[in-house]
Image (cartoon, helix red, strand yellow):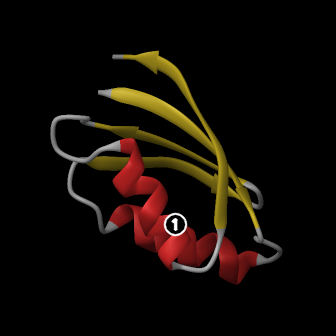
Amino acid sequence: MERVTMKIEGMSCGHCVASVKNALSALEGVDVEQVAIGQAVINHDPAVTSTEAIAQAVEDEGYAVVSTENVQAR
């Protein structure tokens, strides 16, 4: 599992947080640790779901992923 922090633009309220959290939770191999305005921290299995696919799920909800940082591998 890899732990990734994503910086996300366009989020401004609780609805935005819920929307991103639901989109990420729906992905196979992704465990959502935390979603807050402007950021998501997830753990994912890169063999199941790529970082690019995760970012695309966020962007499909109408938000922009401006950076991703692999915090640590587990």
Quadrant in which the N terminus appears: top left
Q: Is residue 59 left or right of residue 31?
A: right
Location of residue 36 with respect to 63 vertically, above or below: above
Residue type highlighted by circle 1: Val
Q: Position of residue 18 (x, y in %)?
A: 58, 75
Residue at the image point whose x is 21% and y is 57% from the top: 28
Location of residue 6 with respect to 58 vertically, above or below: above
**Residue at the disc numbered 1:** 58
Q: Furthest-left residue in view?
A: 47
Crowding at mark 1 (Cα within 10 Å: few <14, some 14-19, many 20+): many
Q: Position of residue 42 (x, y in %)?
A: 47, 43
Q: Is residue 4 left or right of residue 66?
A: left
Residue at the image point whose x is 43% and y is 67% from the top: 57
To which quarter of the image does residue 47 belong? Answer: top left
SS at badge 1: helix
Q: Position of residue 51 (x, y in %)?
A: 39, 43
To which quarter of the image does residue 16 belong? Answer: bottom right
Q: Furthest-right residue in view?
A: 12
Residue at the image point whose x is 55% and y is 78% from the top: 19
Residue at the image point whose x is 73% and y is 77% from the top: 14
